[in-house]
């Protein structure tokens, strides 16, 4: 007679591994910072899957862990535990040399502050050529000009950053991030210092790069004009993915947005705070398994106070 443990093992073996084909995979990702004897858990077992060629937005309140996640994916920060893999590369096991090569060739990064993206004494074209030289490649003026044209700033090739508007600087910065043909573009609040019209231009450039070049793009943002124009928005709360909003176009051409709570690999679920507040849910909830759903109710006053 086959033991139950054997049946469970066979069932697990027949399923594909979690995130087996994902372009970006985070599995129970943890990042702990230690400063002056105090530990801060910025990521608390975060799970995330992103497919190749996706354009997604990551949103969350300050301190939720979204910038820490971006720093981990960019190779600027090393996770404490869990699994983080980008384009087949394990971010926890890379050597210092591998990490440098990864940052130069596999990912491109765009900062919120325009001044951090470009060297002020170089022209737009020279800024795009610089990453090629740093990676030990022969600088390709034609590729630099093609990227600037793709992003709508061909006329900025011969001008220095101080001669450009904020939006032009950010679009040149996207060209810099794309210079070495990365597989992934990471952008940290790329429209945070721009007005709404300019933000639309910069996001349009990111969308153009995503569509024309097939590069996977991950954008951390507070800007609703950005987060509402992607197919998937991932919400982070308290160091974990808490929700996803999926958008699709109906037959009538209307955009339909549906929000989902995220169930992680160990069964944890973050209920939206406004739901919890509306029903005064604290500490305990009552669950009931129905035929096709799980019911969640606030505890009665007697249950809540029964410690």
Image: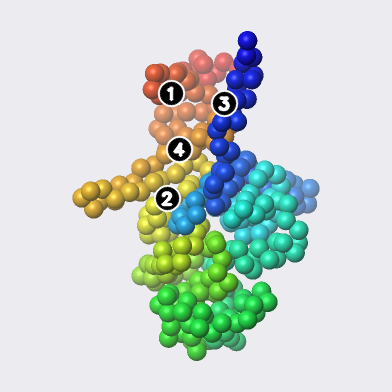
Helix, strand or loop at label 2? It is strand
- Asked whether the beta carbons under mark 1 and mark 2 sit within 8 Å of each other, the answer is no
| Quarter of the image where the N terminus is located | top right
Say whether residue 297 is left or right of residue 266: left
The disc, 3 or 1, on the residue closer to the chain's N-terminal end is 3
Q: Answer yes or no: do the residues labelled 2 and 3 have beta carbons within 8 Å?
A: no
Q: CA distance from mark 1 to mark 2?
A: 25 Å
Tell me the CA gap for discs 2 and 4.
Answer: 13 Å
Work out whether residue 70 or residue 166 is closer to the camera in this orientation and state it: 70
Q: Earlier in the sequence, mark 1 or mark 2?
A: 2
Look at discs 1 and 2 and give the one toward the viewer: 2
Rendered-image quadrant of the C terminus: top right
Compared to 266, does 303 lie above or below?
above
Q: Is residue 148 left or right of residue 90?
A: left
- Please, which colouring scheme is shown? rainbow
Name the residue beneath numbered marker 2. Answer: 232
The residue labelled by disc 1 is 294
Task: Give the residue displayed 62% in from the left and 67% down from the top.
Answer: 105
Q: Residues within 10 Å of mark 2 (few under 14, many from 20)?
A: many
Separation of disc 4 and disc 1 at Cα? 13 Å
Q: Secondary structure at mark 4?
A: strand
3 vs 1, front mark: 3
Question: Which residue is at a point 46% across and 55% down the rendered structure image?
Answer: 54
Task: Mark 3 or mark 4: name the one nearer the start of the chain.
Answer: 3
Give the mark toward the camera: 2 or 4. Answer: 2
Q: Residues within 10 Å of mark 4 (few under 14, many from 20)?
A: some
Looking at the image, the residue that sits furthest to the top is 1
Whether residues under marks 4 and 1 lie with C-beta atoms below 8 angstroms apart, the answer is: no
Secondary element under disc 3, as helix, strand or loop, is helix
Tell me the tag on residue 261.
Answer: 4
Q: Position of residue 121 (x, y in %)?
A: 60, 87
């Amino acid at each position: 007679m086959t033991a139950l443990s054997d049946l469970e093992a066979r069932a697990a073996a027949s399923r594909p591994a979690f995130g087996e084909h994902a372009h970006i995979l985070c599995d129970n990702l943890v990042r702990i910072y230690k400063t002056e004897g105090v530990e801060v858990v910025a990521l608390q077992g975060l799970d995330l899957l992103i497919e190749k060629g996706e354009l997604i937005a990551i949103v969350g309140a300050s301190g939720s862990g979204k910038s820490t996640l971006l720093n981990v994916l960019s190779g600027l920060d090393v996770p404490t535990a869990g699994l983080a893999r980008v384009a087949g590369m394990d971010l926890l096991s890379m050597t210092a040399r591998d990490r440098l090569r990864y940052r130069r060739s596999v990912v491109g990064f765009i900062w919120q502050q325009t001044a951090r993206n470009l060297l002020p004494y170089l022209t737009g074209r020279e800024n795009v050529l610089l990453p090629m030289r740093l990676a030990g490649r022969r600088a390709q003026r034609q590729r630099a000009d093609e990227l600037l044209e793709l992003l709508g700033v061909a006329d900025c090739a011969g001008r220095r950053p101080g001669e450009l508007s904020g939006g032009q600087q950010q679009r040149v910065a996207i060209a810099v991030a794309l210079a070495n043909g990365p597989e992934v573009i990471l952008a940290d609040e790329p429209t945070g210092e721009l007005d709404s019209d300019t933000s639309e231009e910069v996001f349009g450039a990111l969308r153009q790069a995503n569509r024309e070049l097939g590069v996977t793009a991950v954008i951390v943002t507070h800007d609703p004009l950005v987060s509402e124009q992607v197919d998937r928005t991932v919400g982070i709360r308290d160091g974990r993915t808490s929700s996803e909003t999926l958008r699709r176009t109906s037959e009538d051409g209307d955009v339909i947005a549906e929000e989902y709570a995220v169930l992680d690999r160990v069964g944890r679920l973050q209920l939206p705070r406004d739901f919890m507040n509306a029903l005064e849910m604290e500490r305990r909830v009552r669950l009931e398994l129905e035929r096709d759903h799980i019911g969640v109710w606030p505890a009665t006053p007697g249950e809540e106070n029964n410690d």
